[in-house]
Structure formats: C-alpha cells, structure tokens
Image: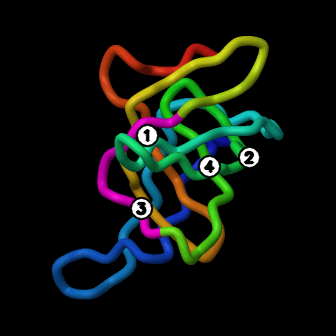
C-alpha cells in the first residue's frame, strides 16, 4: 500500500482535483515535545505527532501564525534543531518538510 499525501486542497489549472502525491518517506507516529523558533526571542511549544526522514506533522495552537520557514527543536533521545518549511496548515495541525542538510534521521 502506497502512503499518499492528503490532497484535498490540490487542484489543477482547470479546478479539478489533482492526483495524490506519493510521500517521500514513511511516517511514524511519535509524541515528542518540540519548540518552534519564530524569532530571536520567540519560542512556541508544540507537539511532534508524526515524523519521517522528510518531514513532520506538528500540533500547534491555531492562533499561532507560522512563517513560511523557521527552525524546529525536537526533544527526543537527544536535542535536535532542524530548519523546516511549512507545507500545510489545518486547525491545530501543521505539516513541515525538513530543509537541506538539516534533514531528520529517524
């Protein structure tokens, strides 16, 4: 079974639903604490809900505005900071992809 990205917002030029895009990696469900680095003096607590080598699903209060790119600190067996890019946002959840050399090794 192929793991597919949720595509309910994706449409082609004519407004038709586009085919789902295959995921870059398999997700694992996790419950790890995280911190979003949104500025030099602004850290926001979050929960890392799903994790793969390519990205993560975060639980972040909907009232928190997220920029297009920011750093994410993940507390696991060790403390990791990775550069991420926002891909989608629905309510209290946000999907991010890991950028360049900062990719997360699960």
Spatial separation of the CA atoms under disc 2 and disc 1: 14 Å
Dot 4 crowding, Cα within 10 Å, few <14, some 14–19, many 20+: many
Spatial separation of the CA atoms under disc 3 and disc 2: 17 Å
Q: Tell me whether the residue at label 4 lies in contact with that at label 3, contact meaning CB atoms closer than 8 angstroms.
A: no
Dot 1 crowding, Cα within 10 Å, few <14, some 14–19, many 20+: many
Q: Secondary structure at mark 4?
A: strand
Q: Which of labels 3 and 2 is toward the front?
A: 3
Q: Give percent across and percent down for residue 83.
A: 38, 31
As rendered, which of 97 and 40 lies closer to the eye?
40
Res. 57 mark: 4
Q: Which residues are magenta?
A: 65-72
Q: Upstream in the sequence, badge 3 or badge 2?
A: 2
Q: Is residue 8 magenta?
A: no
Quadrant where the C terminus sits is: top right
Res. 66 mark: 3
The quadrant holding residue 56 is top right
As rendered, which of 69 and 15 lies closer to the eye?
69
Q: Upstream in the sequence, badge 4 or badge 3?
A: 4
Quadrant where the N terminus sits is: top right
**Residue depicted at 58% across the width and 19% down the height:** 80
Q: Give percent across and percent down for residue 62.
A: 59, 74
Q: Which of labels 3 and 1 is toward the front?
A: 3
Q: Secondary structure at mark 1?
A: strand
**Residue depicted at 69% across the width and 43% down the height:** 48
- Which residue position is annotated with label 1? 97
Q: Upstream in the sequence, badge 2 or badge 1?
A: 2
From the viewer's perspective, is 79 left or right of 16? right
- Which residue position is annotated with label 2? 49
């Amino acid at each position: 079974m192929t793991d597919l990205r949720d595509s309910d917002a994706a449409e082609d030029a004519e407004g038709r639903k586009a085919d789902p895009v295959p995921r870059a990696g398999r997700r694992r469900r996790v419950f790890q604490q995280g911190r979003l680095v949104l500025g030099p003096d602004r850290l926001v607590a979050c929960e890392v809900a799903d994790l793969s080598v390519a990205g993560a699903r975060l639980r972040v209060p909907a009232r928190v505005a997220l920029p297009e790119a920011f750093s994410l600190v993940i507390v696991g067996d060790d403390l990791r900071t990775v550069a991420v890019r926002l891909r989608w946002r629905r309510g209290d959840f946000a999907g991010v992809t890991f950028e360049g050399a900062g990719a997360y090794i699960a």
